[in-house]
Image (tube, rainbow, N blue to C red):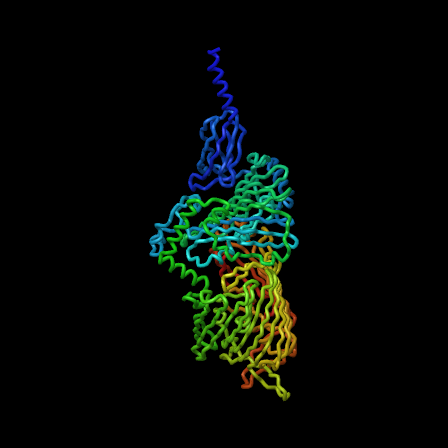
Amino acid sequence: MYKLLPVLVLFLLSFRVQAQGTEVSGKVTDAKTGEALPFVNVFFSGTTVGTTTDFDGFYKISTTAAVDSVTVSYLGYRPTSKAIVRGKKQIVHFRMEEDLAQLEEVVVKPGVNPAFRIIEGAQANRTKNNYENLKAFQYESYTKVQLAVDQISEKRKNSRMFKSIIPLFDTVSQLNDGTNTPVLPVFISETLSEFYVTRNPFKEKEIIKATQAMGVGLEDESVTSQLLGSTFQQYNFHINWVRILDKDFLSPVGDAAKNFYVFTLKDSVMIDGVKTYQIEVNPKRKGDLVFTGTMWIADSSFAIRRLQFFVDKAANLNFLDQFKIQQEYSPAGDDAWLPVKTRILINLDEPSGTTPGMVALFYVSNKDIVINQPKEARFYEDKLEVREDATEQNDQFWEERRHEQQTEGDKKIAHMIDTLNNLPVVKTWVEWVNIIVSGYKRVGKVDIGPYAFLYGYNALEGHRFRIGFRTNYLLTEKFVWKGYVAYGTYDQRFKYMAEMEWFLSKKPWTVMGIRHRDDVDQIGVTDQSYDQSNLFTSLALFQASQLNRSFEQMFWIKRQHNSSWSNRITAHAKNFRFEPIGGRFNFAFFENNTTGQEIISNDFRIFSVTFETRFAYQEQFLVNHNERYSLGARRGPAVTLSYTKGFDNVLGGEYNYDRLNLNISQRVRMGRFGDGDYILSGGKVFGVLPYPILDVQRGNQSFIANRSTYNLMRLFEFACDEYAALNYEHHFNGFLLNRLPFNKRLKWRFFLTAKGVWGNISDENLKLLPQTDELGVPVTQIYSLNREPYVEVGYGIENIFSFGRIDFIHRLTHLNNMNVSPFGVKLSMQFSF
């Protein structure tokens, strides 16, 4: 009996070990960057017992089987195994090394692809799984954004500016792109918000509850907070097209996915007790806007559970060295799946290496999801709301409410940014950047500029010099004063403008303004309120001859009733005076008079009141204290309708007339076929008037192409008292040129343009034009479209050296007019990814 006792003890001990089982937990990271690796396969070696790491790289597995090691495997990394102690709880971390041999070109083999059944199931169930089809949903969202500078050339490192900041560069792991290159953190922020969406009609709202940010040159967190919430971090792969960097990428479960992707079924794993398929995704053509990577699709529901995608460097995108997105989805109710965690890494690099690169990291966590409980319609009227105390939350609040713990790396980044902000060379650099971007230099409570208008030249004034200013929010947030003084060396006259705006309310946005101005106008350019850059306006005045002296007073009040609808009322009094300019331009007309005699004049005065209403569904605005910028409508066109009433014998007005104008504009996304931008406009003037008051069509005699003008029409060539116009541009975003081998490096993009206007000027208005003025000098005649449309079409290449654009334009009608060309080439510059 005693001899059997040791055997019995050993048996009981071995039974206890088996009963206790073996439990292993830990974290899997990238060996180079230290970055957490989500969705890595983790399993006990020699068994089918396994799991995958969560979104933050953590895992936990257990078994009662006899095991001695744990293995991790992941696409693009070398499989790694580590020994473990059987029958114990233990922590085992893995640092995985890249294996580029696994990422060689995919070879498509004949036969039925087993991944197709799963992809087709995901396509068939895409609408059901798409959370945007819920009646309503809401959640709390936590967003963290980090930016850093990298890729500093050796030449720039030795420059005076960078020598003092090079010691601050560090290999901060969460901002590393995989090359272990030192980076310089320049911005970090975190935002906590509530995000709401209702479907019928579609409306969304974000309430930013708390935000804090540190950045180089950052003056005010309230401005940046409007861009850092969940509104701008929406990535949904259960749709056809995913908008990234203002481009449409084809989703791997989109309708045309099998035509653009190669799918490989790699494995099946259990996630939350559900069998899930691991599918490798590769592009058929690397230049297309598609993804590379891995996604996990659940059995039966065919919903995307997890994904990790990259964008190939060969894709037709500018400045992009690396783009990586990781997402984890969770079910919301019985059907739809919402992304609960999203991590994005973007590395931007200018190809020539003359400018530093930029690394951006975005992390979004969503929780406390509520579905199908819509709010009242009034709740969604303000699309974005920042609470008054959002920037005043203390450290304890953030410790309790942030969705992930603050890391030592985050604290290190904040310290580095604070040090950087105190360097004199950085303060100087920030000041110059602000001048270039805004066109103004801040001097205390006043901004001096814009600098594009400092010097000009035209036939009426000769050399023109101008200096202007505006007050900023440091003086007051209730008022803005603007003004300038200009002087011409040829006419030896001073010109000036003084303006004041009073902010009656900023919720809703309500502004009242008044202006007094004595200056020179270019009819069809400086006197019309359409989108134009300061540079274009300045250059247009350089070669201008169709000029008039203007003396005007204006009063207006504008109110934004909600995120979609605004109204404006404007009272406008203006004197027009035209002077002959060197035989190139001479305006005169038969003046209204009570004697019945034909009196020729070259000056007149109007007084008018304009009522304008604008509708742009859920238009997003960025408010910067006393300034506001539109970020575009959420969906649908922007529609502007205006009615103007002109009065005679009121404040000196000489003409009684009515004017109606309509403008409709929209960008239409067409997936792989690119984007189309259209502007439909029309107008009608009722009354007999000198043609400068009519709709003078916008010509362009500069070498710069301009979207808002007819680029082969002369200035002052056509005027209309009724017209209808179409302006269309189509950007193919590489859809056509990506197929050409030489374009893999150039990344050029093809575009088409078409512009046309149909209109007429009545005989009564034409009869106001004499052949000569009162001195017998011939009067410059204006053409009537005479109901024959003016048409010009164009095509060209954009994205030349990432910024340049060249337009080849053909004028198709009205070719017999004087000094016109049927063909032209114009240049412009634009920024686009």
Q: Eyeballing the image, is 758 above or below 40?
A: below
614 or 96, nearer to the observer: 614
Look at the image and tell me whether residue 59 can be seen.
Answer: yes
Measuring 35% from the left and 58% from the top, which residue is drawn there? 424
1 horizontally vs 138: left or right: left
Q: Eyeballing the image, is 190 above or below 457?
A: above
516 or 503, nearer to the observer: 503
How many numbered discs? Answer: 0
667 or 543, nearer to the observer: 667
Q: Position of residue 765 (x, y in %)?
A: 63, 78
Q: Position of residue 677 (x, y in %)?
A: 59, 59
402 horizontally vs 566: left or right: left
Quadrant housing residue 180 = top left
Quadrant housing residue 557 = bottom right
Q: Position of residue 284 (x, y in %)?
A: 55, 43
Q: Position of residue 482 (x, y in %)?
A: 48, 71
Quadrant housing residue 660 = bottom right
Q: Eyeballing the image, is 20 above or below 673?
A: above
361 or 436, nearer to the observer: 361
Look at the image and tell me whether residue 678 can be seen.
Answer: no
